[in-house]
Amino acid sequence: MKFGHFDDDAREYVITTPRTPLPWINYLGSEAFFSLVSHTAGGYSFYKDAKLRRITRYRYNNVPADSNGRYYYIKEGSTIWNPGWQPTQTELDFYECRHGLGYSIITGKKNGLAARLELFVPVGDNCEIDRLVLTNESDAPKSFTVFSYVEFCLWNAVDDSTNFQRNFSTGEVEVEGSTIYHKTEYRERRDHYALYTVNAPVDGFDTSRDAFLGAWRSNANPEVVEKGACTNSVAHGWAPVGVHQINVTLNPGESRSLIYMLGYIENPQEEKWAAPGVINKTRAHELMARYATDAQVDEALAKLHAHWNNLLSTYAVRSSDEKLDRMVNIWNQYQCMVTFNMSRSASYYESGTGRGMGFRDSCQDLLGFVHLIPARARERILDIAATQFPDGSAYHQYQPLTKKGNMDVGSGFNDDPLWLIAAVYAYLGETGDMSILDEQVDFDNDHTLAQPLLEHLRRSFGYLTTHKGPHDLPLIGRADWNDCLNLNCFSDTPGESFQTTGPSEGPVAESVFIAGMYVKYGNEFAEILEATGHADEAAAVRKEVAGMEHAALTAGWDGKWFRRAYDAYGHVVGGQECEEGQIFIEPQGMCVMAGIGVDTGEAVTALQSVQTRLDTKYGIVLLQPAYTKYHLELGEISSYPPGYKENAGIFCHNNPWVSCAETVVGHGDRAFEIYKKTCPAYIEDISEIHRTEPYVYSQMVAGCDAATFGEAKNSWLTGTAAWTFVDVSQYILGIQPTLAGLKIDPCLPHEMDGFTLRRVWRGATYEITVDNTAHAEKGVASMTVNGQPVPTNTLSPAPAGTTVQVKVVMG
Ligand code: GLC
Ligand code: GLC
């Protein structure tokens, strides 16, 4: 069952009923001002950091779900409705929400009145624009009143929802004409305020939530709207809101547009005040003047569309499969941008109050984004590396506002350091900009400890080289990629964090997954060293890598698949002798991607085991058999009910690893089958089972052991976005940026006749045609560049600005 459809020409997903299984959302903004917007206009806004600089309030764990947003109420006679249906839930005559690239358009109609709400964050400014266009589609004049509504957050979203003894007394606003300024704490240490305005004179306003809603009511039935008149309240403490009242009369066929803006302003310390107690509004006036007319808003929208056209022109495929094209060209890259901006901080599952930017999460997000905006990838790499500890290990996350590491989920996740190599290699392959390696970068944000970025990579690799266990495999620390494999935690206290408890004394637990990473990213590090004239060091790195490969194929090999780990007692995790959790997905994908066992047969055997033991119709589950009881020595993984999350859920993030791995051994059919199983566009028809947005990936789909097999959770912010894009763009379609050049090595389902693809790489445009009329799964039989046969399938960079015609014949 579907709740809408794709509109590929407009690059939109069109939701045709407000009654979706869950809120289906979009992200506005890609620089500093961000908004989440659901298909019913729910969601919230923040500046840079969803925890520390929250602009509007959102209610977690609320019923009904998705409570609070920017709401526009229309009162015509005794009928009160919202174009986005929420929060009044008045039945609409027509409803539609179009989520597009950086904007959403929600249209509602009632009794011959149409309300079209366009929401976006303009490029280059810190505000959200909500343009509401009202059209009288009836044949009689109409008079009605429009009430707008946002509820301000007192900046720190955690403090805002906990520190009531203070916060009920601090709220302050100013009202000037049609503009409501939210200035809580501005009088003391803050130099920023928010504003909510409309480009028309108002017939009233409210800034006190109590005055607007009335006692014992909710935003589903505000008293002011019911009565049809604002009270011009000025908030002192309690809950400041922004409400404008505008009375409208429209003749038949007539339209009126109202441009609302939610803005954020920072003032320099010495320019904070216009007069004692009166905030300096100069910057606010300038901002409002930029979006005061329809022409200005149209121009800003055109600029936003151009921004996206430009971004998405870097990689575009045309094949015979419209779902593939739709995901590659539009939605997968779009989601990569959003994960790059948000990491795991703010979604409808990530509250925005917990996590900042993850060290490894952001490194992986970069793999899917680096081709879109290399300059921002560069900046991100330097930010992440600056939080690294001098010994090469890492804080697990850092706060986007301060760019400083924090200990909220601790450190000592021993895969973290290697992801930095992955990110830097991807950046170098994309740009060829070796100068980044010479950048002086702090350790632990301490300038006195700064070293060139190359030294950071050296310490990343060195950390794992010097932290091996009894089987010569890397020590796992608190956990590796799998946050829930806490082999040194031994927690028996309810509520204790699995990630910051322990490690127990003298932890020896080891990870085969990290061994795979060590080989893959160790080889990439060696390539970087070779390219920068460190041949001896590169040789030493390759020797270490060979040793690790051996350990993975001996202590790490279980006979039919790669083991997962050794626990703190030295017992195998993920082996045949285990009662539960005999086989895990992660080491199979990572070790084969690293090339381990490809020549000697283990790789193919491991992938066959994945297919027979872990595959389901909705994707590959993380492990089998699921843990049915809590294992003290394994940690959080066994705390989840069977089939959910890391305990045998379909963790979408590592499905593409297996798909990539299948291409490494040349299995194009299987690689594509895996790709399709979790790919949103291919499962749109089961939206009632899947439940999350059919245009983006979710972190997890309930596995076959779960009561709700096939149900997804945690949409949007997941490493799945980046990894599936890496899978489909580099491994399946096979366009791989490497240090040596642009390698073209597709691995396709045999029935696909080929495709054409446009790839902008290091300033030149490559128009690539792949001919697979031979119906091969892998292998380049011949290749021409601008009509000339070439001996290799790796292209050297062409001069920037040129267009290169590449013809590839598979066979
Ligand atoms: C979540 C985390 C990520 C972790 C994964 C598996 O997606 O953000 O860091 O690797 O879960 O536990
Ligand atoms: C990851 C996991 C989740 C776990 C969390 C701990 O997000 O997916 O299951 O609870 O990490 O931080």
Image (cartoon, helix red, strand yellow):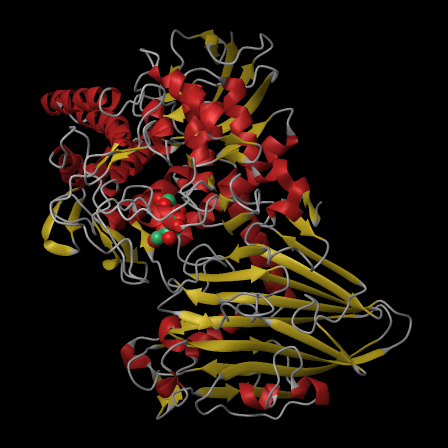
Position of residue 55 in the picture relative to residue 362 (left or right): right
User: Is residue 375 visible in the rendered structure shown here?
Assistant: no
Q: Nearer the viewer, residue 642 or 49?
A: 642
Residue 47 in the image: state x and y as whole percent.
Answer: 41, 65
x, y percent for residue 760: 45, 31
Say which quarter of the image contains residue 533: top left
Residue 773 location (% of width, % of height): 60, 10
At 48% from the left and 19% from the top, the residue drawn is 746
Q: Is residue 9 left or right of residue 406?
A: right
Between residues 596 and 268, which one lies in front from this camera angle? 596
Residue at left offset 51%, top offset 10%? 810
Q: Nearer the viewer, residue 321 or 438?
A: 321
Q: Quadrant of the N terminus?
A: top right
Q: Relative to 347, is 669 above or below?
A: above
Count every numbered label the image shows and give the total.
0
- In the image, residue 97 sits, relative to residue 485, either above or below, namely below
Residue 423, quarter of picture: top left
In the rendered structure, the answer to whether residue 10 lies left or right of residue 745 reads: right
Q: Residue extending furthest right?
A: 139
Going by the image, does 85 lie left or right of 236?
right
Q: Is residue 637 visible?
A: yes
